[in-house]
Every structure is written in structure tokens, then in C-alpha cells.
Amino acid sequence: MKLHKSNPFSTKVSVALATPVIILLALAIISLYDVDVADCYRYIRRAASSFSSPSSSTSPGTCASSSSASSSSSSSTPPPPPAVGACDVTRGEWVPDTEPPYYTNMTCPFIDDLQNCMKFSKPSLEFLRWRWQPDGCDLPRFDAARFLEAMRGKSMAFVGDSLARNHVKSLLCILSKVALPVEVGTAPEIDVTGRAVRRDYRYAGHNFTVSLFWSPFLVKANLSSNATLGLGQWDLHLDTPDARWAAHVVLSSTNWFFRPSVYYDGGRAVACNGGGVISGAHDVTELPVSHAVHGAARYCHERGVDAVRETEAEAQRNGVDLLLLDITEAMALRPDGHPSRYGHPLGGTVEGSFVPHKINPPSPKRSAAIGIPIIALLLLALVLLYDLTFSNSYYPRIARAVSSSSLSLPTSPANATTKPSWACDITKGEWVPDAEPPYYTNLTCPFIDDHQNCMKFGKPSFEFLRWRWRPDGCELPRFDAALFLEAMRGKSVAFVGDSLARNHFKSLLCLLSQEAQPVEVGSTPEIDPTGRAVRRDFRYGNHDFTATLFWSPFLVKANLTNETLGQWDIHLDAADARWAAHVAEFDYVVLSDTNWFLRRAVFREGGQVVGRNSAAGDGDLRNLTEVPANEAVKAAFRTALGAIAATKGFRGKVVVRTVTPAHFENGEWNTGGDCVRTLPFRRDERTLGAVEADFRAAQLDAVRETEAAFQRNGAELLVLDITDAMDLRPDGHPSRYGHPPGGSVEGTFVVDCLHWCLPGPIDLWNELLFQMLAAPH
């Protein structure tokens, strides 16, 4: 699959951007302030009567910029910060911002695909990390509840072209945190361009309606009889407003005036634009586009400053407030906020041949919905996955062909000049910046659990998606879903472990979703005492491939003996039969477990109690011998691996995935700890924790002690050592963004610095697994 680079100068902007600055300005103008358009239209002059006034305001007929002098005082008390109404909101700059978004493409159902930049994997999400800072004042954040209350019993119409639609969709999204409207009305009239002429959205709880009228020229316009649709020729009646839209409106339209057009006044052709001249349809004078916009806007009570000034007096006589929402200069500074080619699937278009690299640069469309970064979008995001091998003298080194596949890895100049991936130690390396788009997003993959859906719940920073693992001395190829599925044809793989095994498993399903979607098969699953399904099977029918997940948090037999205390009896010498009895069904088995051994537990061998862990050192158990958690882990892995090696008929591969570190700082999971870092650690900046180091050593010891048994029985034992690489990624956890505010991961477990966001650094595990199981060496 070819992935394209971003073109920063494309046209339409995503609805799912940051805090829509235009709506903030509109709220300030409509709900809080008034404007003196004739003298200094850009300045917000005074508070509206429906809200409390600021401490000072300008006098009628004066510009806000002069109010500072009249408000000066001889008092020694420092003046308060300027109110929004005391500054020119159109002059300022975009400044960095870290606030989370008001909405995402998961929480707002109104985002059109053409502006859904996260869905189609816009590579960089930096455009979400800025807010508009006017000179001398601050714009407050949008208050959806307050806006809806102010609009109670009212109605609002947006009239214009696709950018007006971009604007109204931003408003619907930003209001979605408080209320979702219902689209009302019968089947809409369809314009000659294929758009609905009118769409109405009703907020019944507030008796408020938002309407969108499609009128790309604002005035009467007909597609010329000898023109084709798309960029064909239009007849524009500059003196006749488009009768299809109503009088109380928010107007915006300019871009369609660049299409080939002939202009009419009084029903007579009087001029044409450059496109009309080229067409040769009329022998009339060429009129600059700006003049046509001016003429159309004059009759429709809108355009730039000229049309507003010329119609202001008439509006005042008729009791109509005429306001100007001037976003031009602010938006001219944001070439980064457009979808580019990420508003449609690969090979698709915006309209006809309208693909970003073919756009005429003099007229880029800019959305009225860009501002402070608020989308937790997702993003999406970028994850470059990786190739595998280990330099250890044991299982970690992959140095020979995988007999199950005759496929070959794609070659590239990089492969020709650097060592092949299996000739280096992939466990030693560093995380380096990467600008590649992700393989999947939370919209394209339906398997992401909420607890790892960081985009859905507004994780503030998406920097964690912009890094890839680079081993010392080699490069890792990207994950190839088609190649993986082909190599797995007619085979099966089982993942056995706890919630991190599930995290790993869901990452694989998501990576494969770019190529195929599986069907979950099987009857109603057995439910574990913890409430989890013991076994889940996902079938890729076209490839005769099954991926299975077994819930077994200790790998060995375990019984919950005290639900109140959460105490377990763990039989260290007996493999959990719920998965071990099915090993012969699989070609590959991926084992992982460590964290549940820190829970309160009593250990048994031969059915007899042999000790307890440190968490169970109270009450009647305090006199039992304390068994270190890492020793229990070693015993459990040794038992599990021994059970597989002894399984009659099993000749497949077993992969032991090493422990993945947690990154709680300033406390533990239950004592206020969190993981708020936004960047990876640098190499040698952090030392692996003692617990993680002991757990990994225990796993490797168990592998060494059972390796001979595997070799005797014709099976293969491998180690997927991700510990060092993941220890450097404190930024890739959900933190508190794996559930809605007020929710939790499990019980009082609110902040999650153990599991990994999807997409995220965990996708590395499957890039490595791909090299171990599917890529021939």
C-alpha cells in the first residue's frame, strides 16, 4: 500500500480541527458584543445587554483601540488584563496550546469524510496544537452550554458554499459535548451540483434550529446550458439574490466565483471572469473576480469590508444588525490545517479531478473551523513498525529461513546499503522521529477497546505517534499485512496471557485490518471469575487463518479464593488446562504474563501450600514463606513451556514475550501516580526498574531451562524481547484517557500507565512478531 506525503497547501480544512476560532469569534460577536462596522469594523465595542458588561467599554462611534486612554486611572492599582472587547481580535498570532479538544471524530457524528483528516491518516497532527492569541487580550474557550442557552428559542442559518458547510459542521461538533441535534424536514431539494439546498438541525431541548443553505454564489446562478458539471460555466445574476435562502443568516461565499462564469445584471450579460473568456461563450468584458464578489455581496448584505460598509446604513434603517466575522488574516497564517490528500481514501478525490497536488495555488480554501488544538484525534497518528532479531546466543537470533513460507521480503535501497534486519540485535537501538502515517486509526479498526482508545477520550498530546524504533546497525521494514496473511494461510496462532496479551492481540487485528477483517467465531464463551472471556477466536476465512486469544493471567492453574481481598491460589506446577489442552490446535503460541503475580496470592505445588507473595503477608498468611514474585514467574513460565514441549504432535513455534514496563511517576497506580510525559526517553537516560529486570531474567531463565525439551520434540522456542525498547516509551500509555471523565480502568484503577494506546508504540511488538513468524530469513 503506497502512502503519500502531506501537501501543506491543499484546500479544504478538516472540520475536526482544534478549537474552532471562527466559532469563538462568532460567539463573541453574536452573544457578547456589538461591532462598529462603519468606523472600525474589526473591533468589538461593547457588551450585549443579554450578558454582564465588562468593567469598561467604548463609547458609541469610537474604536475600541482608543478606549484604553479613556479608561486610564490615577489609581495605583494595576489595570486589569484587557477584556476581549477591548482589543482587535483579528490581529494577533497563533501560539502553542496544549488544551485537549472539544470533540474528536469518534464523539462527533457530523464530520464529513472530506474533512475527517484523522480517519484518512493525515501524517502530522501539529496543526491541532495552536490557538489564536489576539494582540492584548485572550479569547475565552467555547462554552457550548452557554451558547445553546443564548440561542434558546432562536434560529440560525448559514448560507454559502462548501466552506459554509465546513463552518456549520464545526459548530455542530463543538456543541455535541452538550447536546446532539436531530435533522428535521422532508427529503431536501437537490441542487444541480448534487448538494442538498437546505438542511435543518433541531436542538429540541433549547428550541433552537441551525440551518444550512447551499448557495455557492449567494445570488441567482444557473449552470450554462452548454457547460458540463464540475468546473463548468455558470451564469451569475449579480443583482438577484438566490431565493432559496432566508433573510436571517451567516453569509460566506467567494471560492465558486473562480469557476468559469458569465455575469448578468438586469437579465443582460455584462461581463465574465477569466474562465468565461477562455470558454468563448460570450463576447463581453472580463470582470475581475473581486468585483463580482463585491456585486453579489452588495445585494446579499455581505462580503468584505466594502460591501458591508455600503449596506450598513440600509440594514440599520431596517432594524437589522450587520456584523462582520473577519477571519481572513488569521486563517492566511494556517497552511497546515487543510486535509491535503487525507480527506478521502487512497485513489479517491474531493470532487472530480480535484486532488490537492492539482490545485491552483492562488485560491486555497481555508476553513472557518480551525483554532486552538482541541481534537484528540486522533489521529491519528504515525507508527512505523519493525523487523526483528536478537543478538543473544539463545533464541533471540533469527538467522535462517522460516520453512512455513516461501515469500521474500521487499527490497529497497536501504536494504542494499544496511545490514539485513536479522544481522543485528534489534533489542538495542533508539526511538527516532518518524513522519509516516499510521497503519490504522480508531475509525478504521473496530477492535480497539475503549481502555486503549486514547484518541476517543482526548489524550492531549499525540507526539507519541511520531516515533519509530531503529535498531543499531539495521533498519526494520514496515508491517506488511498482505504478506503476513499470506504467510499465515492455513495456519493458526494463539496469544495466551493477561490484559497486555489482549493489548498485543488487538494491535495485530488492527494492523491486519488494512487488508482484511476477521469474523469472530465460536459459541458463547466461558467466562472467567474476573469477568473475562476465557477464549475468543477470530477467523480470516479467505486465508484459512485463525487468531485466538486465551485469558490466563498466571499461565498456570489459579483459583480466586477470596473475592473480597482479591486473593488467588496459584498452582505453580500445573499449567492452566483452559489453554494448555488446546496447544496441539495451533502452529504458533505467544506467551506473556508477569503483572498479575503482584496481586495477593498463595502458591501451591503438588496441591500443597509452599508460600505466598509479599502482598499476602498479613492475617493468617503472614507465617507462610514469602516467595519473591520473580521466582513465581519463573516457575509458572517453566511449567507452561514444559507443558507445550510435552504436547504430543506440537511441532510449531512458541514465542515468549518479555515483560513490558509501567511508567507511573510521582506515585503508584493507586497513590496518585501518572504518566504525563510526551516524548520518549533517550538511550541511557533511564535504567530499567528492578522489578522489570527481575521478571525478564526469570522469563529468560525459564526459556533456557526448557529449550532442550523443545529441540527434542521438533518444536521451536523464540523470545520476543521488547523490554528495553518499551522502557523508553513513557509517553505511549493512556494515562487517564482510556475512559470518560469520572470512569476507571478497573475498580479504583483510574490512571493507566501500564497498557498501551492503539495505535501506538505497542504496534512494534507485531512488527517484530511478523519477522519471527512470517518473514523468511
Image (spheres, helix red, strand yellow):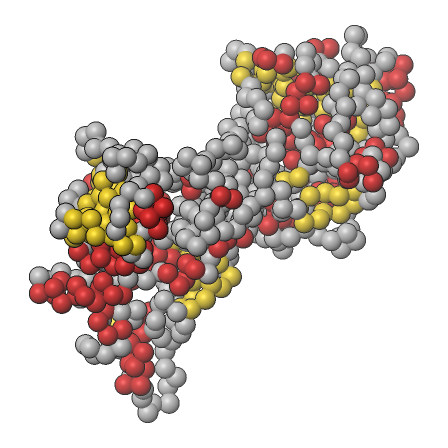
Vertically, is 422 above or below 684? Answer: above
Identify the residue shown where x is 64% and y is 31%: 504
Percent position of residue 529, x then y? 56, 23
How many numbered callouts? 0
Q: Quadrant of residue 582?
A: top right
Identify the residue shown where x is 19% and y is 54%: 300
Which residue in the rendered view is the most extreme toward the front?
283
- Drawn side of residue 768 relative to residue 677, left or right: right
Q: Quadrant of residue 319?
A: bottom left
Which residue in the rendered view is the most extreme toward the left?
318
Vertically, is 474 above or below 324? Answer: above
Identify the residue shown where x is 73% and y is 35%: 477
Percent position of residue 388, x then y? 78, 33
Percent position of residue 171, x then y? 32, 48
Vertically, is 760 above or below 460? Answer: above
- Between 264 and 165, the one nearer to me in the picture: 264
- Between 189 and 576, the one nearer to me in the picture: 189
Which residue in the rendered view is the most extreme toward the top?
649
* Quarter of the figure that contains the C terminus: top right
Percent position of residue 31, x then y? 24, 60
Can the viewer see residue 568?
A: no
* Quarter of the figure that contains the N terminus: top right
Which residue in the rendered view is the most extreme toward the bottom?
74
- Between 108 and 574, the one nearer to me in the picture: 108
Can the viewer see residue 36?
A: yes
- Drawn side of residue 242 relative to residue 712, left or right: left
Q: Quadrant of residue 497?
A: top right
